[in-house]
Image (cartoon, rainbow, N blue to C red):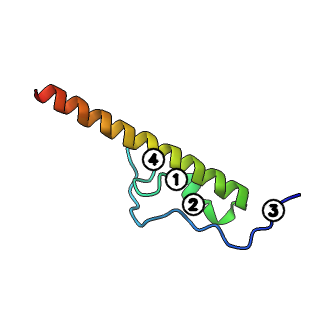
Amino acid sequence: MEQLEFFEIPSPCIGVCEANAKGYCKGCFRSRDERFNWQTYSDPQKREVIRLCQMRKQRAVLAMLEARKKAEADAD
């Protein structure tokens, strides 16, 4: 049995609309296709995009922390 959805799944956009080197939005971490097709996606598709965005953000944060660590180690 499928669960009923009572609320629309909002766009993860935070208004920072600029692509990073990998082509993902720096604000919400969606791909170009994910941003342009958001309105046509079903709720399960939107949930999957949000899950992927969360994973991309985690990887970006970890990469930033690793780069910072390396820069600090190189400065010593």
Badge 4: how crowded within 10 Å, few (<14), some, or many (20+)?
A: some
User: x and y percent of residue 54 in the render?
Assistant: 52, 49
In-image side of 4 versus 64 (left or right): right
Report helix, strand or loop for mark 4. helix
The amino acid type of the residue labelled 1 equals Arg
- What residue is shown at x 48% (from left), y 64% (from top)? 13
Residue that mark 1 sits on: 32
Whether residue 18 is visible to the viewer of this picture, yes or no, is yes
In the image, is residue 37 above or below residue 48? below
Toward the viewer: 14 or 54?
Answer: 54
Residue that mark 3 sits on: 3
User: x and y percent of residue 11 in the render?
Assistant: 56, 65
Q: How many marks?
A: 4
The amino acid type of the residue labelled 2 equals Phe
In-image side of 9 versus 32 (left or right): right
Label 2 vs label 4: CA separation? 19 Å
Residue that mark 2 sits on: 36
In the figure, residue 22 lies in which quadrant?
A: top left
Whether residue 23 is visible to the viewer of this picture, yes or no, is no
Residue that mark 4 sits on: 57
Q: Residue extending furthest right?
A: 1
**From the image, which quarter does the N terminus lie in?**
bottom right
In the figure, residue 6 lies in which quadrant?
A: bottom right
User: Is the Cβ of the residue at disc 1 closer than 8 Å to that at disc 2?
Assistant: yes
Mark earlier in primary sequence (3, 4) = 3
